[in-house]
Amino acid sequence: MASDVQKLYDNRFKDKDKQRKRAMWREICKYFASITNGEYKTVVDVAAGYCDFINNIDFDCKKYAIDVNPDVKKYADEDVTAFTDNIENLSSHFKEGSVSLFFMSNFLEHIPKDTITRLLETEYSLLEKGGEVWILTPNIRYVGGKYWDFYDHITPITDKALIEAAELIGYQVKKCIPKLLPYTTKSALPQAAWIVGLYLKLMPFSGMVFGEQSFLVLAKSGGG
C-alpha cells in the first residue's frame, strides 16, 4: 500500500510542482495563523504528504508529521518528528490529552466515511481540552464533477457534512469558511506565491469567486 501511494504521488507531483507548493504553503500558513488565536504547543500534521503545512507553520511548538508514504521522513524539516504509519495508529504515537492541534489537508476524501468518523474520534481523545482540528478539504458542492478527476478520491465531502459528523462526536465548530482556496495546486489560479498572498488578502471576496475548498476549525469542548 505504501509503495502504491508513493508511486501515485510521484507521478502526480513532479519536482517543480513540489517546489511551487512549498512556496504557496508559506502564504497559506501565514493566513491560517492570522485567523486563529489558539496556543499550540504540540502540532500534528496528519497524512502530511510533503510536509508543506508542518514545515511552514510558524508556531513555537513540537511538530509531528505522520503519513503512510515513507517519503514523509524525506521531506520533513529537522524540527519535525516524522512517522511512517497508518493514520489509524495515531494512538500509538500520542497520549490522550497531549495534542494541541491536528491538521488535515486534502485527505478525508481519500478514506471511507467510517474511517473519517474513527479518525475524528481518535483525534478528539488525543486533544488537550480546547485543542483543535483544522481541516482543509475540497467541497464537492463547489468542485462538482472535477472532484473525481483524481483516482484516489472515494468519499464526497462538504463543509456541512463535516460539521454534522464533528458535532455528533462532541466538537464545537469555531470557524467554517465554505469557500477558501481553489480546488488544487494545479488550478489555473492562484499559482505563484505572491499571487496566493494577494488572493488571501482579498478574502472573502476572492474565495467567493474561486474558492472550492473549505476550511474548518473544530475544538474539543472544555477549554478556552
Image (cartoon, rainbow, N blue to C red):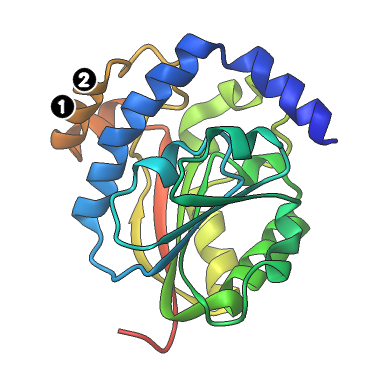
The one of 43 and 103 positioned closer to us in this rendering: 43
> In the drawing, does residue 127 fall left or right of residue 118?
left
SS type, badge 2: helix
Q: Is residue 102 above or below residue 203?
A: below
The residue at 59%/69% (across/down) is 123
Q: Position of residue 43 (x, y in %)?
A: 45, 61
Q: Position of residue 187 (x, y in %)?
A: 42, 16
Q: Residues within 10 Å of mark 2 (few under 14, many from 20)?
A: some
> Which label belongs to residue 117?
none
Residue type, numbered disc 1:
Leu
Separation (CA) of disc 1 from disc 2:
5 Å
The one of 90 and 77 positioned closer to us in this rendering: 77
The one of 199 and 156 positioned closer to us in this rendering: 199
> Which label belongs to residue 198?
1
The C terminus - image quarter? bottom left
The one of 122 and 22 positioned closer to us in this rendering: 22
Q: Position of residue 98 (x, y in %)?
A: 52, 78
| Residue that lies at the very extreme toward the bottom in this rendered image | 222
Q: Position of residue 191 (x, y in %)?
A: 32, 16
| Snapshot quadrant of residue 182 | top left
- Decide: marks 1, 2 in contact (CB < 8 A)? yes
| Residue that lies at the very extreme toward the right in this rendered image | 1
Residue type, numbered disc 2:
Ile
